[in-house]
Image: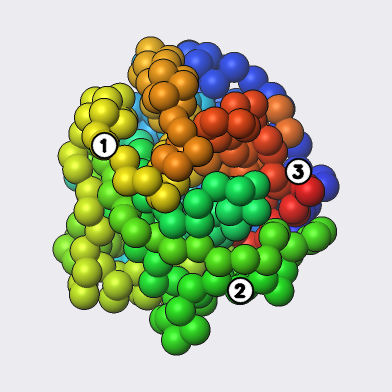
Amino acid sequence: MANGKRDTSANYVVTDPQARGPEAVARSLENQVAYCRDNGAPITASVCEALRSLLDTDRGGIVMERVRKWAGPALADALPLRVAGGLHALHLSGAEPELRPIYEGHEPTDTQDRIAAALEKHEAFLLPWLDGPPQTNEAGRSWAFAAAMLWLADEGLPNRFELIEIGSSAGINLMMRRYRFDLGGVTAGPEGASMQLTPEWRGNPPPNGSFEIVGARGCDVAPVDLTDPDQALRLRAYIWPEFTTRFARMDAAIEAAETMPPDITRSGAGDFLTDVLAEDQEDGVTRIVMHSVVWQYIPAHERDRINTLMETSGAAATDEAPLAWVSLEANRDTHRHELSVRYWPGGEEWTKLGTAHPHGEWVEWGL
């Protein structure tokens, strides 16, 4: 199951991501179990299944008490991943050896008791993990931006690109000019790159061409410094333990950040885009606003503001200085991540280019 193949027995129920209350908390954990199984992560599924079982007990101490009484929308807040991330960090730190059989995939019969004991014993360590959304910056998703640039160039837009990313987290995608991609046989990026990305490709390859990244900057409300060991541990903790290649990619990203840190502004997306989109744009360069697995964490009023900004800026775009919007986000109805693109002038409507595993293990190109 750790090979990224879909588990058709997983039972994911579409629900309102803004729902609140005990039933919403339970459903968020149940859906996370199904989501993990569906994406080849049985270890993380077993952790979330244990947390779901603990809801109906008095075990788990203060941590589970906060989970049971969660005031916000549990699904939109990614509550299961907050707790699971903290437990994984506890394991990675070596502070709780009783978790080792779980994270090594031995499937102990007392998983629920081991999780409950860890929650009770390490409350001071785990409680802060409930205070903020997950940071799931993942280099494997940058395939989408590379494929989108190839497609945009094939559509006739300048193949020199300025990348503007919202929700950049640690800026791993902002460093993609130093990554090598093999997208269904179509290659891009420096051959000797330490970051080699070769997702399993299903369907036709993207257009064969080239692109040049002339600039890359982004924003985040709480940017992560990859060169800080404590912050790097936080990102590692949100990596599902089943996917060992993701840890190798994280090591490569940390190495890249140490030599040339990404350009990230501490800011909300709306304020950042207001400033950036007002700047003069060089002729012969396509400006891309891009994001991956972040839209769900942006408040509705902020999303509306971003939509308005993009429509207004798109109306002013020219053939010499076009604007594109590239989105890799989860479709809550299909339970799949979709790569969609629109651009101005000429391609104002969204075009879905493909669907993919949430961490880039495989891609289904739709064109």
Image-based side of 325 in relation to 69, left or right: right
Mark carried by residue 317: none
Near mark 3 (Cα within 10 A), the count class, few <14, some 14-19 or many ≥20, is some
Which residue is disc 3 drawn over?
Answer: 10
Q: Position of residue 31 (x, y in %)?
A: 63, 34
Q: Residue at x 19, y 43 (%)?
A: 265
Q: Position of residue 169 (x, y in %)?
A: 31, 48
Near mark 2 (Cα within 10 A), the count class, few <14, some 14-19 or many ≥20, is some
Q: Pick the residue in front: 5 or 343.
A: 343
Which residue is disc 2 drawn over?
Answer: 187
Q: Earlier in the sequence, mark 1 or mark 3?
A: 3
Q: Residue at x 71, y 27 (%)?
A: 333
Is residue 216 positioned above or below 198 on the image?
A: above
Residue 178 in sight in this render: yes
Location of residue 259 (image quadrant): bottom left
Q: Position of residue 305 (x, y in %)?
A: 37, 16
Mark 1 or 2: in front is 1
Mark 1 or 3: in front is 1
Which residue is disc 1 drawn over?
Answer: 280
Location of residue 58 (image quadrant): top left
Q: Amino acid at mark 3?
A: Ala
SS assignment at label 3: loop
Mark 2 or 3: in front is 2
Q: Amino acid at mark 2?
A: Thr
Q: Amino acid at mark 1?
A: Asp
